[in-house]
Image (cartoon, coloured by chain):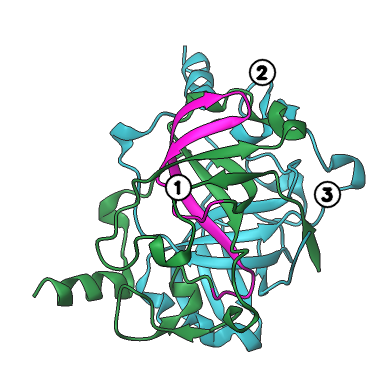
Chain colours: A cyan, B green
Amino acid sequence: MFSLQPIGHARSPYKTAQEVPKGLGAKHEAEGVLEILPQFELGLTDIEGFSHLIVLWVFDRLSAEDRLELLGTPPADNRPHGVFATRSPRRPNPIGFTVVELLRRDGPSLHVRGVDMLDGTPLLDLKPYLSSIPQDKLRRGWLADAEARANK
Amino acid sequence: MFSLQPIGHARSPYKTAQEVPKGLGAKHEAEGVLEILPQFELGLTDIEGFSHLIVLWVFDRLSAEDRLELLGTPPADNRPHGVFATRSPRRPNPIGFTVVELLRRDGPSLHVRGVDMLDGTPLLDLKPYLSSIPQDKLRRGWLADAEARANK
């Protein structure tokens, strides 16, 4: 119904989904590069001022059978949850979301920390991270429960 | 290059873009409903446990000329910035991003606070909001500068 175009591609240390840290306590500190296509470089003007960026990208390495699982068991738990309550790739629209720390800009290349997408992943959008929900206002549902059980 | 399908639609008090609060200090506290299509309702399982949700949606009310502006002056400033350093709708891929507070779930309908999309907007995805960047780690670029100038 809607068609999208890549604005660039991610360079990441991860070549396969198995290499990406997952599950409880997984840390996303890998460095990578967001390579923006030359025709969109002007859109990066002033992005250096932001410490963190929202990256939207495509899960482009799913097999046909992987495409949708409305209820599934994520790596962080042994109980099933709805796909909209997880970050599973098996979503109706295979769009990934990652917050990265911007380390430096080199023309159309953004060097960042916190990539969790695969090398070569098509990027759809970058947006500035503007504000946070305070920790004391945040409830984290099944994930908090799973962490509590794991720490027992 | 990639095709997407709506997973539902937003009910919002805003019928036109002019009604949506914009610019410095704009508050997004409007209540609305995310109406998920019946075939995706199972994907909402356990979503009630999360206080905040990430909503991805389509800017579907843009005119053809509105479609792309790589460098533009946002409502919060009188200086131009790159589109990837703003939340402007005039992006290469017209995907909107909003964090809402989940007030309650009523079957396939999520009652939320903080809608800034128009009534009837097609929704692409919901994801749980899992963690925040601490305020002392966050730099907000031109927006912080514009706020400082406005408060002089």
The span shown in magenta is B90-119
Q: Tell me the quadrant of the picture where the C terminus of chain B can be found.
A: bottom left
* Left-right relation of B116 to B62: left
Residue located beneath label 2 in the image: A79
Helix, strand or loop at disc 2?
Answer: loop
Residue with the most extreme top position: A152
Of all chains, the one bearing label 2 is A
Q: Is residue A35 above or below residue A135?
A: below
* Left-right relation of B83 to B44: left
Task: Tell me the quarter of the picture where residue A51 sits.
Answer: bottom left
Q: Is residue A138 above or below residue A43?
A: above
Q: Earlier in the sequence, mark 3 or mark 2?
A: 3
Q: Which mark is residue B99?
A: 1
Helix, strand or loop at disc 1?
Answer: strand
Q: CA distance from mark 1 to mark 3?
A: 27 Å
Residue with the most extreme left position: B152
Residue drawn at the location 59% of the way across and 81% of the way down = B68
Label 2, residues with CA under 10 Å away: few <14, some 14-19, many ≥20: few
Of all chains, the one bearing label 1 is B
Mark 2 and 1 residues: CB-CB less than 8 Å, in contact?
Answer: no
Task: Tell me the quarter of the picture where residue B67 sits.
Answer: bottom right
The image position of residue B45, as x and y in percent, is 64, 24
